[in-house]
Amino acid sequence: MLLIPAIDLKDGQCVRLRQGRMEDTTVFASNPVDMAQRWVDLGARRLHLVDLNGAFEGKPVNGDVVRAVAARFPNVPVQIGGGIRDAATVAAYLDAGVQYCIIGTKAVQEPQFVIDLCKQFPGHIIVGIDAKNGMVATDGWAEVSSVSAIELAKQFEQAGVSAIVYTDISRDGMMKGVNVEETAKLASSISIPVVASGGVTNMDDITALCAVESTGIMGTILGRSIYEGTIDLAAAQQYVDSVK
C-alpha cells in the first residue's frame, strides 16, 4: 500500500485545513519544497499536492510551487489537484514533470471532460471524489451534490482513470480516524484502484486499511497525522511493506 504525504498549498505555503475550510488553516511550512524533501527523505514514494487557492478560484494559483516540487524530485511521482478545469492545465503540469492530475469538481459537473482527458493523457488522470454521507461535494467542499460517490465513480470505470482519491470530508483534518467502511465499500464496487483520504490519524487506521486492501485500496493520503507526529511515516512505510 502506498503511503502518500499531502502537501496542501495556500498562498505559497504548506498548510492543513479542517474540513476544507480556508479560514481554519494551520501553516506547517513556508517552503513546500523543503517539506516535500522531508517526506521523500523518510521514504515517500509518491507526493500528493493540492492547490487550495486553485480549488476555490477554479484555476491554478500555486502552479510555480507544484513545478518546483516536480523538478526537485524527478523520480518521485507527484499528483496534483485543485483548480484543474481544462486540458491545457493538465498538459502544462505533465510537461513540468507532474505524473498525475486529479480532477474533482469538473468530474462531477462534466464527466465527459474526464473521459476526454483519459484519451488525451492516458495513464495520467485521477478522479478526486470528496463525499459527505456518501454524497459528492464540490467547489472546495462548499456544495454537496445529489450524486453518490459510487454512482460517480462507476461513470469512469471504462475511461482509463488511474485511480480514485476518495475523501470523507466530515473527517478530513479532524484526526477522528479514516472511514474504512465507506472507502472499502467504494473500492469493492468499482474496478478502479482507490486511494483513501481524510481522517487518517494513527497506525490503527493504517492497519485497518491494510486489512481491507484486497477490496481495491491501493494507498492512503497522510496529512495532519504526519505533520503533528501521530504517525511516523518511516515506521508506517516499514509496516505496510511487511504485510504485503
Image (spheres, rainbow, N blue to C red):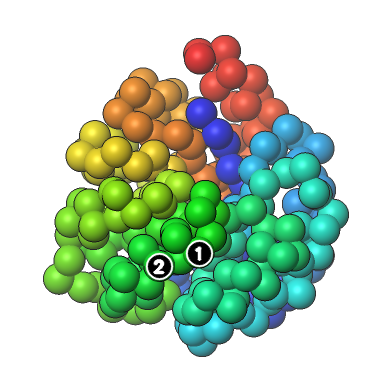
The answer to whether 145 is drawn above or below residue 177 in the figure is: below
Question: What amino acid is at disc 2?
Answer: Asp
| Between 45 and 35, the one nearer to me in the picture | 45
- Mark 2 lies on a secondary structure that is helix
On the question of residue 156 being in view, the answer is yes
Give the residue pinned by disc 2.
116
Taking the spot 22% from the left edge, 52% from the top edge, the residue there is 154
The answer to whether 142 is drawn above or below residue 32 in the figure is: below
Taking the spot 47% from the left edge, 78% from the top edge, the residue there is 85
Question: What amino acid is at disc 1?
Answer: Gln
Residue 39 placed where, x, y %?
73, 43
- Mark 1 lies on a secondary structure that is helix
Taking the spot 80% from the left edge, 49% from the top edge, the residue there is 73
The answer to whether 26 is drawn above or below residue 79 in the figure is: below
Compute the Cα span from label 2 to label 1.
6 Å
Q: Is residue 9 left or right of residue 58?
A: right
Query: Residue 46's image quarter?
Result: top right
Taking the spot 67% from the left edge, 37% from the top edge, the residue there is 45
Mark 1 surroundings: few (<14), some (14-19) or many (≥20) residues within 10 A: some
Residue 58 placed where, x, y %?
49, 84
Residue 55 placed where, x, y %?
50, 77
On the question of residue 18 being in view, the answer is no
Q: Is residue 70 left or right of residue 203?
A: right
| Between 128 and 7, the one nearer to me in the picture | 128
CB under 8 Å between discs 2 and 1: yes
Query: Residue 2's image quarter?
Result: top right
Q: Which mark is residue 120?
A: 1
Mark 2 surroundings: few (<14), some (14-19) or many (≥20) residues within 10 A: few
Residue 224 placed where, x, y %?
56, 51
The answer to whether 242 is drawn above or below residue 130 in the figure is: above
